[in-house]
Amino acid sequence: MRDRRHPYQAFDSKLISPFLESVGTHLTIYTIELCTTGRSNTHYKLTLSDGSIYILRLYAQSKPEQDAYIFNLVKDVVPVPKLLAQGPRWAILSFLSGKLLSDCPEHVGKAATAIAHLAAIQFKAPGHLQTDGSITPFGFAGLSGYIAQQLDHPVVQHWLSPTTLIRLQKLQHQEASLLQELDAETCLVHGDFNPTNILIQDGQVSGILDWDYCHSGTPYMDIGNLLRYTPINQHQQIKVGLERGGMALPPDWQQRAEWVDLTSQLEFLTSSRSDAFKQQCVDRINRYVLR
């Protein structure tokens, strides 16, 4: 099994039976393929007897109502699937064609432009998005508070050296005003904007998938996620793509993205991900704070 937050869920043909009846009385499932790129939910690619393709999404933590709200919110801004049927913990989505950005990284600039388009969607406050359009505040005191909370966590202290912990604490205090500025931003954030969630077709973004972690906050979370998985020699493409999408970048835009991505690395250390993955997080943190 691939390194995941939640185990794969078994395929249940009962979930798709009513949908099959609604789209064609004589349709059957021709092939079932487990999609292995995700880390939380389970996805099956279903090819029917007429050649049509759908995605069965089995939820581990979010709900189909959340996807329905987000897809409707962004459908005119970026390409997303259509939610065609749903149950308490599952949904059937339209299939989007394209190659993963991880397989065609030369198009990373187009993905960056999509981040800028999402960031143009603004809310009244930062926090978790609710399906009625309201915002629930985060359960921590901003980025600085979250970093302090994680640094006090015994699991984080186990993974990070005393030198790294001390250096992080000093940097946190030195950058307090920057962190407060980032805390005040209220843009639409995907929250997991990595190349395995981005589809590319004909040189354009053809799909953005897996919106489980979307929220109102700073777009530098998505930028930091994209930078993390992109070689340094392509970072200029990300800058160009962001500006092409209308984002005005300050000189320290990469530093801002690294600070926000640091919170993700600290969160990963307390997750159920593998030790090998957590060691990669430790290496990223050390490269940032000890350079």
Image: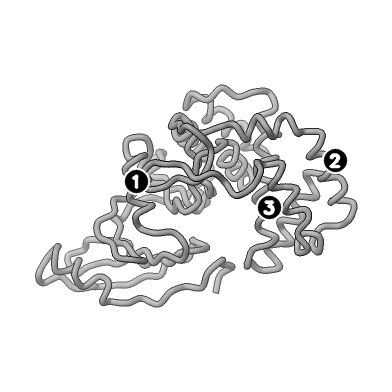
Task: Single out the mark in the foreground, 2 or 1.
Answer: 2
Q: Is residue 231 something that shows in the picture?
A: no
Q: Would you say the residues marked 2 and 1 are in contact, meaning their CB atoms lie under 8 Å apart?
A: no
- Report the amino acid beneath label 2: Lys
Residue pointed to by mark 3: 265
Residue pointed to by mark 1: 71
- Report the amino acid beneath label 3: Gln
**Please, is residue 38 above or below residue 26 in the view?**
above
Residue pointed to by mark 2: 170
Residue at 32% from the left image edge and 77% from the top image edge: 12
Crowding around mark 2 (Cα neighbors within 10 Å: few <14, some 14 to 19, many 20+) is few
Nearer the N terminus, badge 2 or badge 1? 1
Nearer the N terminus, badge 2 or badge 3? 2
Q: Mark 1 and mark 3: span between their CA atoms?
A: 27 Å
* Residue 239, quarter of the rendered image: top right
In the rendered image, residue 47, in percent from the top left (x then y), is placed at 27, 66
**Please, is residue 114 above or below residue 214 in the view?**
above
Q: Which secondary structure, mark 3?
A: helix
**Please, is residue 194 above or below residue 38 in the view?**
above
Q: Would you say the residues marked 1 and 3 are in contact, meaning their CB atoms lie under 8 Å apart?
A: no
Q: Is residue 259 something that shows in the picture?
A: yes
Q: Mark 2 and mark 1: span between their CA atoms?
A: 41 Å
